[in-house]
Image: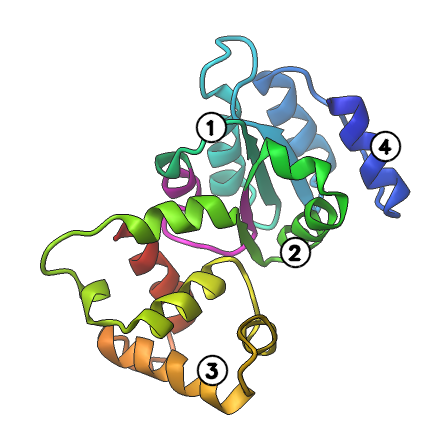
Amino acid sequence: MRAGIVHVLTEAGMDVVGVAGDATTLLDQARRHCPDVVVTDIQMPPDRTDDGLRAAQTIRETQPDVGVLVLSQFLEDRYALDLVGDRADGVGYLLKDRVGDLPTFVEAVRRVAGGGSWLDPLVVQRMVGRRRAARPMDRLTGREREVLGLIAEGRSNQGIADALGLNLKTIEAHINGVFLKLDLEPAPEDHRRVLAVLTYLRA
């Protein structure tokens, strides 16, 4: 699978500067090359449990300019939450089944490399489906939830408008409604879009 991913990325015009077969080598390669993005599996040697995820978290903590895209064969939203942590920039979580969808996979890599985020739609849907009492997310309408879900996938306002077949001003109104209902007031030190996504993921 590593060889296949290297081939796909190279064919897409990207430079693959290193390949790692275990979490220790992955960390070493990331420190040595400081790439735009690291693509890693969750399960890697030596333990073959969540070594790749833990390595990805270490890279995000110690090399914040390096994007991290984690591949998983499991639909586990807790992995996505652990990976995102307190910031949603430069991070992605993609089910391995999506790697076969080459345009989607390449777009995810490019977006994360550029400082954006990409969360697998199935993981997002699972998170949205979880209901808890007395949470801020309960204040949102169905359409506002849908818009926030697309924000969590890394879509721009125009991308959301295109996906839902709505005009840009309507999308902006829905996003403002999300900010209002989640009590996210404008502040120079905060990025409300990221905070809204984090609230969405934790819910």
At 61% across and 75% down in the image, what residue appears? 162
* Residue identifier under label 3: 171
* Residue identifier under label 4: 7
CA separation in Å, label 4 and label 3: 38 Å
Q: Residue furthest front?
A: 165
Q: Secondary structure at mark 4?
A: helix
Is tag 2's residue or tag 1's residue first in the polypeptide sequence? 1
At 63% across and 39% down in the image, what residue appears? 98
Q: Is residue 3 left or right of residue 202?
A: right
Vertically, is 126 above or below 22?
Answer: below
Vertically, is 144 above or below 79?
Answer: below
Q: Is residue 139 left or right of residue 95?
A: left
Image-quadrant location for residue 3: top right
Residue 74's label in the rendered image is: 1
Vertically, is 150 above or below 175?
Answer: above
Residue 171: give x, y in percent of width and height. Answer: 47, 82
Q: Which is closer to the viewer, label 4 or label 3?
A: 3
Q: Secondary structure at mark 2?
A: helix
The crowd level at tag 4 (other Cα within 10 Å; few <14, some 14-19, many 20+) is few
* Residue identifier under label 2: 111
> Is any atom of residue 186 visible in this view?
yes
Residue 39: give x, y in percent of width and height. Answer: 65, 35
Q: Is residue 59 left or right of residue 4?
A: left
